[in-house]
Amino acid sequence: MAAAAKFPPGWRVVTAEAAGPLHLAGGGENQDAHAYRRLGDGFVLAVADGAGSAAWSACGARTAVAAACRVAEDLAGAPPRERSGWWDLRRRYVSRFLHTFDAWAAGLGRPPADLATTVLAVVAHPPAFLFVAVGDCFAVVEHAGGGTHLLLPPDAGPDDGAAVFLTSPGRAASLRAELLFDPAVTGLALCTDGLVEPALAAGRGPGGGRVLRAPQDFERYFSAFAGPEHSPALLTDRMHSPEFAAASADDKTMVLAVRT
Amino acid sequence: MTGPFPDVQGAKSRLLIALVVDNSSSMREQDAIGELNSALAAWRGEIQADANLCRIGEIALVSFGAGGEGGATVVDPSGRGRDPLPSPFVPVGEFAPPTLVASGYSPMVPAIQRALALVDRRREELAEQGIAMAYRPLVYLLTDGAPSDEDGRPSDRWRDLAQELRRQEAEQRLLFFAFGVRGADRQVLEGLAPEANYLMERNNFSLVLQAVRQSIDRVMSSGRNAPAEVVQAGVKDTVGELRELQDWFIRQTGL
């Protein structure tokens, strides 16, 4: 489903998700989740990717995005008065988010591993943005006149093969919490790792390993929705296209916030 | 039509699949080799119908019987008989297995070791090009017998190999599956793949390759982070269902 919501003036949110072809073929459910809320003049966006191997991971993913939004509403309904307050907010948000997720997950009465999920959230009071992530979701930022930039690459874990989950014992060491202050940000895209293949480009890093980047034309995802002419359903259609299905068997979710 | 959106990006990850197949002389019995050749030809069509697998999958084929290095032969998986091979792996879309001929002993262990080395080398080549593993490489053994050395004497070197396979699985470097048809040594299959061994009745390579196909799907749907035991348990369920279906079919049709 795709949706557009009333949002702080000057911003438009568009979301789209598609269950992976193999999940569909097997009668399984989409294990991705997403959510967003308005925070006064700001907003919070979140995506999560439940692990395909965990029995209740779709529930874990929904719990993760719900916790990310609830804690943002509790702590960041208005921005800190001074920029220095963002560092304190970062600390408190991370701590409260993990605590809330754990408490809600415990209430489900399942072993934590059954709820394995990655998560990526951004708490935004432009020009300030707080990104919090565990695992291999990724975030792309668009700057006015500056193109697109893979701000938060997917963290696929050691040897590119073992992403850390929100339920993993090692999550604290893998958690990323980054602050961005940039009045030139004109778009944010939060994506689950099913979109790495169709949407990101790759090259070799200085050490020879793979380095992912947002291709130049990624900006078309933002420009498509900078005006009112395109329906969000177009993005959903694209996610369900044969080309996207061929690119990745995984579930795919994209949440866009675009300055209009 | 991409509408207002960019084109889909090129593939930047791979799934490596290595088939280690028995073409020793015992495979002549009741034309097991013919069954294998037919099953491989049909399997080719199945995997090539999967657009995602065609995009990311690469296949290598190692046989063990007569010829090759110590009885292990890296077969051209494109069926073109290229010598030397530019690469032991071909994209799934180019997989066209040649007709295998049965002869020689059963040097299974060198063949599996050869396949592991091919996977390692290909993984390194791809890493140098900035291409990651989409999922752990998958190595499949298909046999009707027991391992021998190059001179046909029974060999228990598979016990050492089993330890190496467990180590690589624990490090999430690969998943190994052992499939046997009538005549295969159950103890060896269980030793090589304690949680992923399957002994099929008759020379049912068609069922074996259906199970291989299902295991690939299971790996792809479980994600690259799934523990080996979770994937293997899922494959076991699927193979069990396939067997039940097959049994039902035989009961109904007598075929």
Image (spheres, coloured by chain):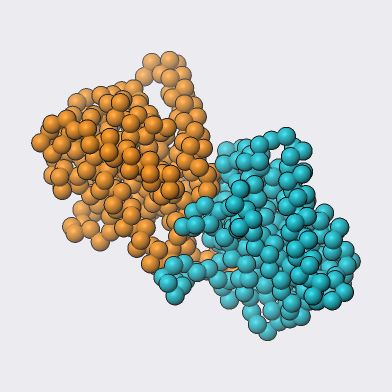
Chain colours: A cyan, B orange
Q: Nearer the viewer, residue A62 or A22?
A: A62
Q: Residue at x 74, y 39 (%)?
A: A106
Q: Nearer the viewer, residue A78 or B211?
A: A78
Q: Position of residue A85 (x, y in %)?
A: 81, 72
Give the total number of marks visible in the rendering: 0
Report the residue that reaches farthest toward the left. B151
**Residue B8 occupies which quadrant of the picture?**
bottom right
**Residue A10 occupies which quadrant of the picture?**
bottom right
The answer, for residue B51, to whether it is visible in the render is no
Q: Is A201 rendered above or below residue B225?
A: below
Q: Quadrant of the N terminus of chain B?
A: bottom right
Q: Quadrant of the C terminus of chain B?
A: top left
**Residue B100 occupies which quadrant of the picture?**
top left
Q: Position of residue A28 (x, y in %)?
A: 62, 39
Q: Position of residue A122 (x, y in %)?
A: 74, 64
Q: Nearer the viewer, residue A79 or B241?
A: A79
Q: Residue at x 62, y 41 (%)?
A: A113
The answer, for residue B164, to whether it is visible in the render is yes
- Horizontal arrangement in the rendering, residue A126 relative to residue B248 (left or right): right
Q: Residue at x 46, y 31 (%)?
A: B236
Report the residue that reaches farthest toward the bottom. A145
Q: Position of residue B184 (x, y in %)?
A: 27, 27
- Horizontal arrangement in the rendering, residue B215 relative to residue A124 (left or right): left
Q: Residue at x 79, y 66 (%)?
A: A89
Q: Is B65 rendered above or below residue A175?
A: above
Q: Nearer the viewer, residue A181 or B216?
A: A181
